[in-house]
Image (cartoon, grey):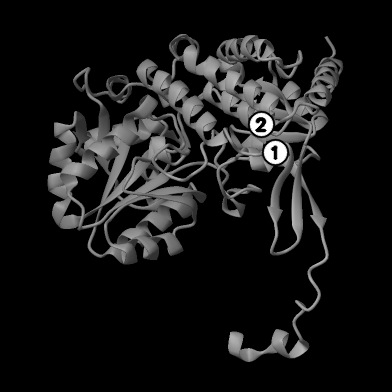
């Protein structure tokens, strides 16, 4: 099989389907979008089971929650939104906005989210009248293929044309590059090499940056409320999400109390130098995260490191010995390991978090547990991240949820910090072109030169 000819055939079929779909009015489009999301919601359990069996990553119960939660919140935020024809009239400026599809969307999806990411990509692409070609990670291809099959069965019943959502069933790096080169727009949710390939494909592209979520805990919040949230965020799906908390900063005088609370929540506190060094060496080989550690249970990770913990241990908590490049434990760990730091002043906590982000995770996200607006905004102004969640769980909140105003997404842009074109959560509004009708403004509304240059307005 000639890869280029194969992908070209996929793109031609996708373009034909998209051109037919582009004629659908808003109600018909929305019925198709709803069908795609609801099908994953209805098959959340079987798709979660398949993902765990195929990839060996993550936790079944959390993947069920992820499949249901993301499909639900995405549809909730999409329904009622205009995405076809005239979408907005701005009377004050005489502008009328008209939405147009971008065409064929090519999506590279990760092994860590083989159901949620294709589903979300499909929902936001279809909302804008586009078609979608999914190119999954080879390690999760069976799950991704089944996800697309389920969505296709549902959207065809809802009246969608054939080939509106397609998938490359036997993906390779070459296939992924061809999909990105031949489609109209690329979404790359995966490793840095695929993101770079998307940006060098010659087509408009949306990519992601590496996560390394820093969690700052202020003195005015009760640890009894914060620690369970930190644990839940860190252990979700065995820590494979880029939105999971990675390091936490606690007032030094409360550090012992925090560690005790972690233990009560089912954590094993890694404290002896031998265990700390062994865990660090297992997690990172020459400064690079060991892929064998991604998405595995704490007991298994401990065994790989040469020590034992109870089988029901929820996470490993370890005191890091430095920030940034001083200690690899400051970096992203895609498994249930949480690094802990003590601080004296709030300003110190912010600077330490910045040091970790400068090492890894620039542009991604942070969590702040505080009831002091001055502290929250002091940190937010200085942290080089695109999202700052306040008094909430990172893993389930930063990608958008019913309980905050962030757009639900599977693709978290990291701005120029993370070499991305987007510094927000990817949404359907990024996958449509907008035409603008400009009507003349009423006579007599033009400002004089004196009014334009007046200094009193500065």
The quarter of the picture where residue 160 lies is top right
Q: Which residue is mark 1?
A: 431
Viewport quadrant of the C terminus: bottom right
The quarter of the picture where residue 235 lies is top left
Q: Residue at x 57, y 36 (%)?
A: 411
Q: Percent x, y for residue 139?
A: 57, 16
> Observer-nearest residue: 344 or 292?
344
Answer whether labels 1 and 2 touch (C-beta < 8 Å): yes
Q: Residues within 10 Å of mark 2 (few under 14, many from 20)?
A: many
The quarter of the picture where residue 251 lies is bottom left
Q: Residue lying furthest front in this view? A: 443
Q: Residues within 10 Å of mark 1 (few under 14, many from 20)?
A: many
In the displayed structure image, the side of residue 244 where residue 39 appears, left or right: right
| Label 2: which secondary element | helix
Q: Percent x, y for residue 245?
A: 36, 40
Q: Which residue is mark 2?
A: 127
């Amino acid at each position: 099989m000639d890869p280029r000819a194969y992908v070209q055939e996929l793109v031609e079929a996708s373009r034909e389907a998209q051109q037919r779909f582009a004629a659908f009015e808003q109600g018909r489009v929305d019925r198709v979008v709803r069908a795609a999301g609801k099908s994953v919601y209805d098959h959340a359990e079987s798709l979660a089971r398949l993902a765990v069996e195929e990839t060996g990553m993550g936790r079944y119960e959390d993947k069920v929650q992820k499949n249901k939660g993301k499909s639900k919140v995405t549809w909730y935020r999409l329904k009622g939104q205009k995405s076809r024809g005239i979408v907005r009239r701005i009377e004050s400026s005489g502008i009328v906005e008209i939405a147009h599809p971008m065409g064929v969307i090519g999506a590279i999806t990760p092994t860590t989210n083989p159901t949620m990411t294709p589903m979300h990509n499909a929902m936001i692409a279809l909302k804008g009248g586009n078609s979608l070609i999914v190119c999954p990670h080879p390690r999760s291809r069976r799950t991704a293929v089944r996800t697309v099959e389920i969505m296709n069965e549902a959207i065809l019943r809802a009246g969608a044309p054939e080939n509106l959502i397609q998938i490359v069933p036997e993906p390779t790096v070459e296939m992924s590059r061809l999909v990105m080169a031949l489609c109209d727009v690329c979404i790359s949710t995966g490793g840095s090499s695929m993101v770079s390939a998307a940006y060098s494909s010659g087509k408009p592209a949306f990519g992601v940056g590496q996560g390394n979520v820093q969690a700052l805990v202020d003195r005015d919040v009760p640890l009894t409320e914060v620690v369970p949230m930190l644990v839940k965020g860190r252990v979700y799906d065995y820590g494979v999400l880029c939105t999971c908390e990675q390091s936490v900063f606690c007032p030094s005088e409360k550090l012992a109390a925090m560690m005790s609370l972690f233990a009560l929540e089912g954590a094993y506190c890694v404290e002896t130098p031998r265990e700390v060094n062994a865990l660090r060496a297992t997690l990172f080989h020459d400064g690079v995260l060991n892929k064998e550690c991604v998405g595995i249970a704490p007991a298994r990770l401990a065994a790989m490191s040469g020590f034992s913990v109870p089988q029901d241990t929820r996470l490993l908590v370890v005191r890091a010995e430095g920030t940034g490049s001083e200690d690899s434990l400051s970096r992203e760990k895609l498994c249930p390991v949480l690094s802990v730091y003590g601080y004296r002043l709030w300003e110190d906590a912010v600077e330490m978090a910045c040091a970790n982000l400068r090492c890894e995770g620039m542009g991604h996200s942070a969590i702040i547990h505080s009831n002091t607006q001055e502290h929250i905004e002091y940190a937010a102004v200085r942290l080089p991240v695109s999202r700052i969640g306040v008094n909430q769980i990172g893993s389930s909140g930063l990608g958008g949820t019913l309980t905050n105003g962030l757009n639900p997404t599977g693709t978290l842009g990291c701005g120029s910090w993370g070499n991305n074109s987007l510094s927000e959560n990817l949404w359907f509004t990024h996958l449509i072109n907008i035409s603008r009708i400009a009507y003349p403004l009423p006579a007599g509304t033009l400002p004089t030169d004196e009014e334009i240059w007046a200094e009193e307005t500065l």
